[in-house]
């Protein structure tokens, strides 16, 4: 299929002399809305803008102290652009180019608002992808959109859009920063409510120079935010600021994010003990529920005591919350009581006292941003883990994959598949197994039904470590992070008591050395462990999968969570009550599992029987399998269950066939089977008809897939196994 370009990108030098060339551009001279990128390769700086008056805007930029030093203009034009579209493309470019990291952006468009307009989803998302690919081709961008979507630099960028809820939180914080009677601002919100993004945005806003700030997209709040910012900069012209992150792993990640944002640097992100070195005008504490007291600190005891001495505090009576209050002229705590996960965390009572103090105010964030299932999913988890779900209630969401597995092997396989498809898919478990592999890298930590797994091989930024999808993370290496999919293993420290119909804790199987010592009240330990599972079950943006070691707990979860089924047939569509082989059902084969031994179709592992669609003529020799990959996506979407019939012989030209590749693996499907359109080119001579060549053709919206040409010699390496009949689960 030929593709008609929807956009054009034209390059011009950025100088007064080059303005004449711009006048020859019909879009630039004709007051069309367009987007532009100013860049400088030598110093790796760039500015992104949109305008309907290109010549005037370029003249203004040439008078600007910083922008006039840029050397290139890339005009992005399209007949499809209107003002809303160019605002959107500009906003998206700022977000993604900031995360791409090739250039330091001179933009001050913080907290860009999302614009909604006619055909945005139907047309302009495709337009932006084309814009980005063209910029990569021109060397203006370097990384794919899919890669950036999964990157922490993008997730924690201050250029991300702020929701109404977050903007109201921003206004509250700014008002209170100017209130002389307020020292402590507590921003409460559950996991995924955008606390970290708001904290980083606020940090960037306050530290930005006046000329870098452009809040035009804040709409009705613009005047109020601008006036508050002016007043704040007057009250604190050059505030000394720090962002405290208690968890080492997450702190490492945010330091990396700060490194790629103009005006920020990794040294602004510190651990609590560094507060002992100096006082600050403003301290923001992300994940403040993880600030510690002197209990079960392990190797951290020495640093804790040293900081207490330097600050003149009683080490037995204070917590890191007190350190913040003493060392900060203004302190902003981002807090979630439900994410306190071990005895060393500062007591809930400490925060209750903090919130009730005369010099404290509290604001609550409500909107759920991480999990696509939204707040209903969060509310359901609270009920599920505390045994309060009504009988017969099963939670489902159209835009969220939420399943409980009977087989850990299948869940591991599913997470691996998701990692290959969308990335950022990880296994996470409760701390129910000792960390044997820490001392012996060849040892396995978690062994369940023949599945052998290892704990995370690093504590720092494990989520982003190459190969981490093959390992299992714990609460300490995942708290604060976003994932696309999370596979949660409920360990042997958490069970379900059928008699009391409640979740119970088995302390002897809880192996977090500092997580259970000194706890005498079983209810206290249970609350910590419940908080752990609640927190890790809120990591997955697109889906959460669950396996429980305890059979009774697994049965309890299956009462309220959809059960993962290998057979994904749609019973409503087929009206099947009972599957009858070769009457209304055919065998389902896992062709990917068969790689390595192909003496015939029977070598592929038969997994089950699957119902066929109504009206299908069923006969022996039919079978079903999932087709993986994008090379046939015009007809067969990736991962679709399809019906085939064993090769009946005869002419196959123009038909879609399943082919076994005996000597190679298909790059698209990842197995030795491939699905393509079959074309045979023959000639005849005195000996009769013979193949000259065979072509296996893709049928994809992605034009990068090329036909596979088979010579007569190569054809012996390929065998047609079956003909495509129809899609089963469309």
Image (tube, grey):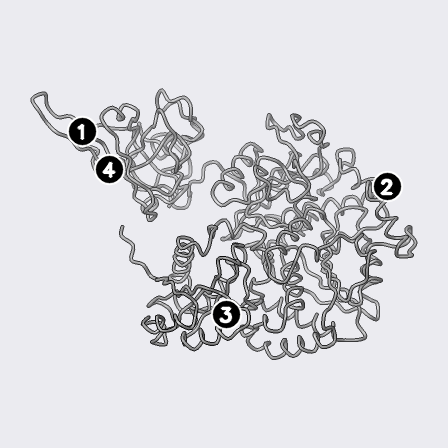
**Discs 3/4, front:** 3
In the image, residue 32 sits, relative to residue 144, either above or below, namely below
Query: How far separated are the C-alphas under marks 1 and 2?
Result: 79 Å
Q: Secondary structure at mark 2?
A: loop
Q: Label 4 near label 3: C-beta < 8 Å? A: no
Q: Quadrant of the rendered structure where residue 460 is?
A: top right
- Whichever of labels 3 and 2 marks the residue nearer the N terminus, that label is 3
Residue named by callout 2: 518
Looking at the image, residue 183 sits to the left or right of residue 490; the answer is right
- Marks 4 and 2, the one that precedes in the sequence: 2
* Cα distance between the residues tagged 1 and 3: 63 Å
Earlier along the polypeptide chain: callout 3 or callout 4? Answer: 3
Q: Kindly check if marks 1 and 2 are in contact, taking CB atoms under 8 A apart as contact.
A: no
- Measure the C-alpha gap from mark 4 to mark 2: 70 Å
1 vs 2, front mark: 1
Q: Which residue is mark 3?
A: 68
| Dot label at residue 655 | 4
Q: Name the N-terminal-most of marks 4 and 1.
A: 4
Residue 190 lies, in percent from the top left, at 67, 57
Q: Of circles 1 and 3, which is in front?
A: 3
Residue 160 position (above or below residue 616): below
Mark 3 falls on what kind of element? helix
The mark nearer the N terminus, 1 or 3, is 3
**Which secondary structure, mark 4?**
loop
**Point 81% across, 75% down: residue:** 181
Give neighbour class at mark 1: few <14, some 14-19, many 20+ (Cα, 10 Å). Answer: some
Closer to us: mark 3 or mark 2? 3
Identify the residue position indicated by label 1 in the image.
Answer: 692
Q: How many marks?
A: 4
Question: Distance between the Cα atoms at labels 3 and 2?
Answer: 63 Å
Would you say the residues marked 3 and 2 are in contact, meaning their CB atoms lie under 8 Å apart?
no
């Amino acid at each position: 299929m030929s593709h008609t370009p929807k956009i054009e990108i034209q390059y011009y030098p950025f100088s007064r002399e080059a303005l004449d060339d711009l006048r020859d551009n019909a879009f630039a001279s004709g007051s069309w809305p367009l987007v532009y990128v100013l860049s400088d390769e030598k110093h790796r700086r760039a500015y992104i803008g949109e305008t309907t008056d290109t010549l005037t805007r370029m003249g203004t930029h040439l008078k600007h102290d910083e922008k006039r030093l840029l050397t290139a203009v890339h005009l992005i034009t399209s007949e499809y652009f209107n003002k809303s579209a160019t605002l959107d493309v500009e906003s998206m470019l700022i977000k993604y180019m900031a995360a791409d990291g090739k250039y330091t952006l001179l933009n001050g468009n913080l907290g860009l608002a999302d614009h909604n307009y006619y055909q945005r989803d139907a047309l302009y998302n495709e337009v932006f992808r084309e814009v980005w690919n063209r910029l990569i081709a021109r060397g203006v961008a370097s990384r794919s959109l899919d890669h950036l979507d999964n990157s922490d630099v993008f997730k924690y960028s201050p250029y991300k859009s702020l929701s109404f809820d977050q903007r109201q939180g921003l206004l509250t914080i700014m008002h209170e920063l100017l209130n002389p009677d307020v020292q402590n601002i507590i921003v409460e919100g559950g996991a995924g409510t955008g606390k970290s993004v708001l904290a980083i945005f606020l940090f960037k806003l306050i530290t930005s120079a006046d000329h870098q700030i452009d809040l035009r997209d804040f709409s009705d709040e613009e005047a109020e935010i601008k006036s508050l910012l002016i007043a704040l900069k007057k009250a604190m012209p050059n505030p000394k600021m720090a962002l405290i992150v208690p968890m080492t792993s997450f702190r490492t990640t945010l330091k990396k994010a700060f490194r790629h944002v103009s005006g920020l640097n990794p040294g602004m992100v510190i651990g609590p003990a560094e507060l002992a070195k100096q006082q600050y005008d403003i301290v923001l504490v992300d994940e403040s529920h993880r600030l510690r007291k002197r209990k079960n600190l392990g190797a951290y005891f020495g640093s804790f005591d040293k900081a207490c001495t330097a600050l003149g505090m009683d080490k037995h009576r204070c917590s890191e919350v007190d350190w913040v209050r003493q060392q900060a002229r203004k302190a902003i705590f981002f807090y979630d009581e439900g994410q306190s996960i071990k005895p060393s965390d500062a007591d809930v009572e400490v925060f209750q006292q903090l919130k009730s103090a005369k010099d404290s105010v509290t604001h609550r964030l409500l909107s759920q941003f991480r999990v696509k299932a939204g707040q209903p999913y969060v509310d359901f988890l609270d009920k599920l883990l505390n045994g309060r779900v009504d009988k017969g209630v099963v939670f489902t969401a159209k835009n969220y994959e939420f399943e409980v597995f009977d087989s850990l092997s299948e869940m591991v396989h599913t997470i691996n598949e998701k990692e290959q498809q969308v990335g950022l898919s990880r296994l996470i478990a409760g701390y129910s197994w000792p960390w044997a592999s820490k001392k012996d890298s060849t040892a396995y930590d978690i062994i369940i039904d023949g599945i052998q797994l290892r704990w995370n091989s690093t504590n720092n930024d494990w989520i982003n470590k190459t190969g981490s999808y093959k390992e299992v993370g714990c609460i300490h290496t995942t708290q604060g992070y976003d994932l696309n999919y999370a596979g949660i293993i409920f360990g042997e420290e958490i069970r379900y008591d059928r008699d009391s119909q409640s979740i119970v804790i088995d302390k002897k199987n809880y192996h977090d050395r500092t997580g259970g010592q000194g706890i005498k009240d079983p209810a206290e330990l249970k609350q910590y462990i419940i908080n752990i599972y609640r927190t890790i079950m809120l990591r997955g943006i697109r889906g959460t999968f669950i396996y429980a070691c305890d059979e009774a707990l697994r049965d309890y979860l299956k009462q309220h969570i959809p059960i993962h089924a290998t057979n994904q047939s749609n019973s409503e569509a087929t009206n099947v009550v009972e599957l009858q082989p070769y009457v209304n059902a055919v065998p389902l084969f896992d062709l990917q599992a068969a790689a390595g031994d192909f003496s015939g179709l029977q070598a592929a592992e038969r997994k089950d029987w699957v119902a066929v669609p109504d009206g299908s003529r069923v006969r022996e020799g039919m079978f079903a399998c999932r087709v993986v990959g994008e090379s046939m996506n015009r007809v067969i979407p990736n991962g679709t269950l399809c019906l085939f019939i064993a090769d009946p012989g005869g002419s196959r030209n123009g038909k879609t066939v399943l082919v076994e590749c005996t000597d190679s693996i298909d790059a698209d499907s990842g197995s030795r089977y491939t699905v393509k359109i079959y074309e045979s080119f023959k000639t005849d001579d005195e000996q009769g008809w013979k193949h000259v060549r065979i072509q296996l053709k893709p049928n994809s919206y992605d034009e990068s897939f090329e036909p596979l040409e088979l010579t007569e010699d190569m054809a012996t390496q390929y065998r047609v196994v079956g003909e495509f009949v129809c899609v089963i689960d469309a």
